[in-house]
């Protein structure tokens, strides 16, 4: 199995002001991510508000991103759903449209009760797209499902022939390292917390999936380049800057906050869907001022004003 190196952006789903999907912005957004040097995109996940969309909408968005990517980027489609039947339908659809991989969170209403139960659930989903690599999406702070990931790999591997690895979005770097090294590095374990990218690289990460890579990938890629070339002081300084940006971001709801940053950079991706809410004018102005004081708009990729059709 070829492992993923580099950065994968958790892409936003653009919406019109009335809450419908703005399909026409997806090609331009994809072009931006290609130009920023990303390896791939992760669609319909947390950043993409997948849980707030219908199954039909998620299929439309996945298809639009696959078409826009045109094999210039890997396209990971998040198919997780509290209904395994719906997740299977999303997985089968992702395979039919030419996606490169699928990923699924644990059910987050009726939650898995054991690692075996979790593995059985993921096996059902992965089996609906047997030709695609499957990544379990471990994000316990959102799903409330925090289980032993080494045990998951042990149980899931024989049950899921297309198990590629884990999208590991948790702070437990010691477990993350153990997953990387499990069975001589058999699985592709992609790290998922942007503000911990450099520490994750220190224990072996080569690839990562993250939300702030949608607007700051070139800054993170500098960190990765410094690290690979042994320039640790430069790597720490570069990474520390984005940690500071994220310290301000997490004062606000993270997805509306990141959509606000995109708007500040000229990309009007529309509102969020309830229960997420967009920024008030006051919050937007305050956040803009905080980022401006960090010289973020001097360091971030050049603005490209994109009109919403």
Image: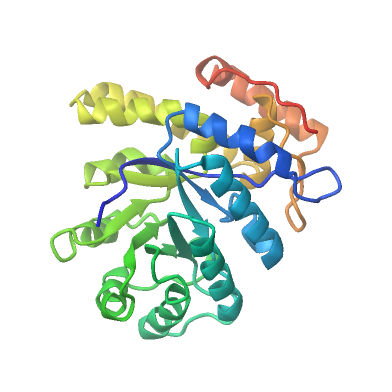
In which quarter of the view is residue 233 placed? top left
In which quarter of the view is residue 185 placed? bottom left
In this rendering, the answer to whether 256 lies above or below 184 is: above
User: Residue sitting at 58 percent across and 18 percent down?
Assistant: 297
Q: Position of residue 138 (x, y in %)?
A: 43, 63
36 or 62, nearer to the observer: 62
In this rendering, the answer to whether 31 lies above or below 64 is: above
In this rendering, the answer to whether 200 lies above or below 31 is: below
Q: Position of residue 167 (x, y in %)?
A: 40, 57
The reply to whether residue 242 is in sight is yes
- Quadrant where the C terminus sits is top right
- Quadrant where the N terminus sits is bottom left
User: Residue sitting at 61 percent across and 41 percent down?
Assistant: 251
User: Residue sitting at 69 percent across and 24 percent down?
Assistant: 266
User: Residue sitting at 52 percent across and 70 percent down?
Assistant: 92
Report the number of numbered marks.
0
In the picture as drawn, the residue positioned furthest to the right comes out as 18
8 or 34, nearer to the observer: 34
In this rendering, would 38 be left or right of 270? left
255 or 171, nearer to the observer: 255
In this rendering, would 133 be left or right of 285? left
Q: Position of residue 13 (x, y in %)?
A: 66, 47
């Amino acid at each position: 199995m070829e492992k993923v190196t580099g950065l994968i952006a958790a892409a936003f789903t653009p919406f019109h002001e009335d809450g419908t999907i703005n399909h026409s912005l997806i090609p331009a957004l994809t072009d931006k991510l290609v130009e920023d040097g990303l390896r791939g995109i992760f669609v319909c996940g947390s950043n993409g508000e997948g849980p707030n969309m219908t199954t039909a909408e998620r299929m439309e968005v996945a298809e639009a991103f696959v078409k826009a990517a045109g094999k210039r980027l890997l396209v990971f489609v998040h198919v997780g759903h509290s209904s395994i039947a719906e997740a299977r339908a999303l997985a089968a659809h992702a395979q039919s449209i030419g996606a490169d991989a699928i990923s699924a969170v644990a059910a987050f209403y009726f939650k898995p009760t054991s690692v075996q139960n979790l593995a059985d659930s993921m096996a059902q989903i992965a089996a609906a797209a047997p030709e695609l690599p499957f990544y379990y999406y471990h994000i316990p702070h959102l799903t409330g499902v925090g289980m032993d990931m080494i045990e998951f790999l042990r149980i899931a591997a024989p049950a899921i022939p297309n198990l590629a690895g884990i999208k590991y979005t948790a702070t437990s770097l010691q477990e993350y390292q153990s997953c990387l090294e499990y069975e001589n590095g058999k699985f592709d374990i992609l790290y998922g917390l942007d503000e911990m990218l450099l520490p994750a690289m220190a224990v072996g990460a080569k690839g990562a999936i993250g939300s702030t890579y949608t607007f700051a990938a070139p800054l993170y890629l500098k960190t990765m380049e410094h690290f690979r070339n042994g320039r640790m002081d430069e790597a720490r300084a570069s990474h520390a800057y984005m940690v500071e940006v994220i310290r301000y971001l997490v004062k606000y709801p993270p997805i509306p906050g990141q959509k606000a940053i995109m708007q500040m950079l000229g990309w009007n991706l529309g509102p969020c869907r309830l229960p997420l809410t967009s920024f008030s004018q006051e919050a937007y102005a305050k956040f803009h001022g905080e980022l401006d004081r960090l010289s973020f708009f001097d360091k971030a990729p050049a603005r490209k004003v994109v009109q919403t059709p």
